[in-house]
Image: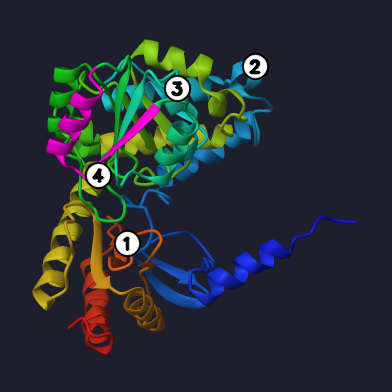
């Protein structure tokens, strides 16, 4: 007889009663600003495709050519027989882009954090100090360690220093923060974090998944934004956001790469990236480095859209990046707004409890370089129409 699975139905019923079920819509074509979703034309405002590179001809061609040359998969984990020259070429390009000695590419941004963080501490004599709003993949990585743990209030440098003082006797001190916080669109004060780390002898780990292609000169990321090259020990990120492909990034010293390659279980035990993906990763970075207009257009769209939303009377929170929330307060308001926008052909997802605090529900919009000014004006007209319907204007 199979095991008792009634608990699963009970959990489903509980989520359904609270309107917390994930029911993803279906894309019927490429993820681009004007797309087809659930059978209707839609303007996409909920993708991480900041630079619109998912359909860039050079990126697509690189994937096609590499697949023809190398095959659909690598046939092994990289530690044994799955490392191809195209993987190494992509990693060299990442290091060049980031201005560091070396990089290592993982299967995803999530697997970087859950695989790398546990290798950086050894036991309760060490401490991990984490921003309270860090991404769930960081939280999962921390949970896999035996280190002591401390959390500081979001971007509160006074509290971070107090925690560092309280753990001065710890052997290893590791400060972890997101670069760009994905729910609010604000950024970590990384210059202050690194200054405190230097004062108290701590290592610094920044997850720049939403900063690559967005922050810094030409989109090199938050470390470049603050001109902190050489002062951040572990810079991690993702190809699946602005770079439009898939995979996780670790950038740093050659020793950091060697350490991760030999100790990070999520890298050692995962099949390597399909060669077509590796080629697309390299191509995406080359496009970003040689076609700066994508980065410039992203910021033009961001500044225009945020200003127009604010002029209508919407609260965009603390956003300073292309992640622009429209604060709603109650989850029911956010859900109603998402539904109303969807009826008008705009995909803008509701972010509700437990992803954010109960009174901090919001619509999260994300800009793309591929959005035209007409696209943005069409969306803004929809927000202006829907705002009074849900009580936000």
Q: Of circles 2 and 1, which is in front?
A: 1
Please say if 79 is above or below 161. Answer: above
Residue linked to disc 2 = 80
Residue displayed at 12% across by 77% down:
312
Q: Earlier in the sequence, mark 1 or mark 4?
A: 4
Q: Quadrant of residue 189?
A: top left
Q: Nearer the viewer, residue 154 or 159?
A: 159
Residue linked to disc 1 = 357
Residue linked to disc 3 = 89
Please say if 59 is above or below 149. Answer: below
Residue 212 lies, in percent from the top left, at 30, 39
Mark 2, Cα crowd under 10 Å, few <14 / some 14-19 / many 20+, is few
Q: Is residue 238 left or right of residue 264?
A: left
Contact (Cβ within 8 Å) of mark 3 with mark 2:
no
Mark 4, Cα crowd under 10 Å, few <14 / some 14-19 / many 20+, is many
Q: Earlier in the sequence, mark 4 or mark 2?
A: 2
Residue linked to disc 4 = 214
Q: Earlier in the sequence, mark 2 or mark 1?
A: 2
Between the residue at mark 1 and the residue at mark 4, the CA separation in whole angstroms equals 26 Å
Q: Nearer the viewer, residue 64 or 205?
A: 205
Q: Is residue 109 left or right of residue 285?
A: right
Contact (Cβ within 8 Å) of mark 3 with mark 4:
no
Q: Earlier in the sequence, mark 3 or mark 1?
A: 3
Residue 271 lies, in percent from the top left, at 62, 30
Is residue 157 within the magenta segment? yes
Q: Of circles 3 and 1, which is in front?
A: 1
Q: Nearer the viewer, residue 354 or 351?
A: 354
Between the residue at mark 2 and the residue at mark 1, the CA separation in whole angstroms equals 45 Å
Residue 110 lies, in percent from the top left, at 47, 39
Q: Which residues are magenta?
A: 148-168
């Amino acid at each position: 007889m199979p095991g008792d699975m009634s608990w699963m139905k009970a959990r489903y019923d509980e989520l359904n009663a609270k309107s917390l079920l994930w029911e993803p819509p279906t894309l019927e074509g490429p993820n681009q600003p004007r797309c087809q979703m659930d059978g209707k034309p839609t303007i996409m405002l909920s993708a991480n495709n900041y630079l619109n590179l998912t359909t860039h001809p050079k990126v697509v061609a690189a994937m096609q050519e590499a697949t023809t040359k190398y095959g659909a998969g690598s046939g092994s984990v990289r530690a044994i027989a799955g490392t191809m020259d195209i993987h190494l070429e992509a990693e060299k390009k990442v290091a060049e882009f980031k201005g560091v000695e070396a990089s290592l590419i993982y299967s995803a941004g999530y697997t970087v954090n859950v695989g790398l963080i546990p290798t950086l501490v050894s036991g309760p004599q060490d401490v991990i100090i984490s921003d309270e709003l860090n991404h769930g993949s960081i939280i999962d990585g921390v949970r896999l360690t035996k280190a002591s743990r401390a959390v500081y209030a979001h971007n509160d440098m006074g509290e971070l220093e107090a925690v560092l003082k309280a753990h001065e006797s710890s052997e290893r001190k590791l400060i972890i923060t997101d670069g760009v916080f994905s729910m609010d669109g604000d950024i970590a004060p990384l210059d202050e974090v690194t200054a405190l780390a230097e004062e108290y002898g701590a290592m610094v780990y920044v997850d720049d998944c939403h900063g690559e292609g967005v922050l810094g000169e030409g989109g090199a990321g938050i470390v470049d934004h603050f001109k902190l090259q050489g002062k951040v020990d572990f810079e991690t990120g993702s190809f699946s956001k602005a770079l439009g492909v898939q995979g996780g990034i670790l950038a740093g010293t050659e020793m950091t790469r060697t350490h991760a390659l030999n100790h990070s279980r999520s890298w050692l035990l995962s099949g390597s990236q399909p060669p077509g993906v590796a080629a697309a990763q390299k191509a995406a970075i080359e496009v970003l480095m040689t076609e700066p207009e994508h980065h410039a257009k992203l910021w033009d769209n961001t500044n225009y859209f945020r200003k127009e939303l604010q002029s209508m009377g919407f609260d965009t929170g603390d956003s300073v990046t292309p992640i622009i929330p429209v604060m709603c307060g109650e989850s029911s308001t956010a859900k109603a707004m998402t539904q109303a926008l969807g009826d008008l052909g705009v995909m803008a997802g509701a972010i509700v409890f437990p992803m954010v605090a109960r009174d901090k529900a919001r619509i999260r919009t994300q800009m793309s370089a591929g959005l035209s000014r007409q696209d943005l004006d069409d969306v803004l007209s929809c927000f202006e129409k829907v705002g009074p319907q849900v009580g936000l204007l």
